[in-house]
Every structure is written in C-alpha cells, then in structure tokens.
Image (spheres, rainbow, N blue to C red):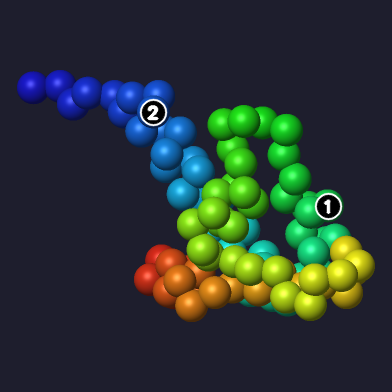
Amino acid sequence: MRAEAPSAETSEKAAAAALTLQFLAFVADGRSYGETMEAWRSTCPRMPIWEDAVRDGLVRIENVGAMNSSRVVLTARGKARLGRNGA
C-alpha cells in the first residue's frame, strides 16, 4: 500500500508552523519593533507570520512609540509555544 503525498494545504501549514517558531526564536533574542518589521515584513498573503503571531497572542509590542524604542516581546503563550517545540 502506497502512502499518500501530503496535500499542498498540509505542506503550507507545516511551513507556516516552522516559520512561526523561527519568528518566535528571533523575538526571544530581544528585538526592537523596527528590527522585527525589517526582518519579518512580508507581502506574501500566504505567509503572514508576523501578523498571525500578533493575532494569536504569541507576541506583543511594549513601549509603543518610535520604531526602534518599541520592543517586540513574547507573551506567555508565545514562550509556551516556543518551549514545547524544543527551542
């Protein structure tokens, strides 16, 4: 019996999950809002990692003001997601 190949949707979800973990690890190193936007902005509607992480409550912006004085930090939920995936 032959195993079925993963669907495009499954592959997309796996890629998004892996990118989300990379994003959370990036933020965990301590980043300004400006650094985060520079590194993670995307015009691809299929990979909105930054927007999804904010929407899902994985990160938040502290000290809202100038781009380089505001900080992007992990929430407890973000830390838990990063931690349970061995990062």
Q: Is residue 46 left or right of residue 76?
A: right
**Residue 75, image x and y in percent?**
54, 74
Q: Nearer the viewer, residue 86 or 23?
A: 23
Taking the spot 62% from the left edge, 30% from the top edge, the residue there is 45
Taking the spot 53% from the left edge, 65% from the top edge, the residue there is 58
Q: Nearer the viewer, residue 26 or 48?
A: 48
Please, what secondary structure does the residue beneath circle 1 have? helix
Check the image and report above or below for 14 versus 75.
above
Task: Determine crowd level at label 1: few under 14, some 14-19, many 20+ residues with C-alpha closer than 10 A.
Answer: few
Image quadrant for the N terminus?
top left
Visible in this render: residue 86? Answer: no
| Residue on which disc 1 sits | 38
**Residue 60, image x and y in percent?**
63, 68
Q: Nearer the viewer, residue 54 or 31?
A: 54
Quote the CA–CA distance across marks 1 and 2. 28 Å
**Marker disc for residue 46:** none
Taking the spot 62% from the left edge, 49% from the top edge, the residue there is 51
**Mark 1 and mark 2 residues within 8 Å of each other at the beta carbon:** no
| Residue on which disc 2 sits | 9
Q: Quadrant of residue 20?
A: bottom right
Q: In the rendered structure, which disc, 1 or 2, sits on the residue that comes first in sequence? A: 2
Visible in this render: residue 60? Answer: yes
Q: Quadrant of residue 32?
A: bottom right
